[in-house]
Amino acid sequence: MPNTDMSLKDAMSSIDGALGVALVDYNSGMALGTLGGGPELDLTVAAAGNTDVVRAKLRAIEILNLGESIEDILITLSSQYHLIRPLTSRAGSSLFLYLALDRKRANLAMARHQLRRIESELEI
């Protein structure tokens, strides 16, 4: 099973249009690992900001008493897609994968499929 670094490298190399990827702890808002990004996309800042998104959605699910879990969250920007995928394993219960994609180069369905695969193989 791949570790964090190998999984992040896998995401960047196997997902067309990947701009950056991070493994994030939504209890603390800290990125446990990042790859890609750059001056226009600070993955550490994105990790902290998207922690609020995950927390808000978890609160909404609880308030609505839906009894559901988040599979993924999609944020669509004019030139990018941002995917947030909470980890489902017990060891990763407060972690999520964050992936930023170039909208012109990415295939959203394939990116979701690959991110799901990477999550299933990730060893924390």
Image: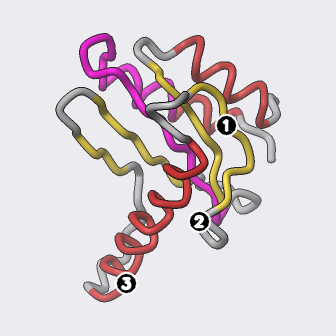
Question: Residue 45, position in %: x, y?
Answer: 54, 52
Mark 2 sits on what residue? 26
**Mark 3 or 2, which is nearer the eye?**
2
**Count of numbered marks:** 3
Residue 110 relative to residue 47: left or right:
left
Magenta residues span: 93-115
How packed is label 2: few (under 14 Cα within 10 Å), some, or many (20 or more)?
A: many
User: What residue occupies the far left of the structure in this picture?
Assistant: 78
Residue at the image point whose x is 44% and y is 32% from the top: 40
Amino acid of disc 2: Tyr
The label on residue 54 is: none
Mark 3 sits on what residue? 62
Residue 102 relative to residue 64: left or right:
right
Question: Residue 31, position in %: x, y?
Answer: 67, 51
Question: Residue 63, position in %: x, y?
Answer: 31, 88
- Magenta stretch holds residue 42: no
Residue at the image point whose x is 30% and y is 79% from the top: 60
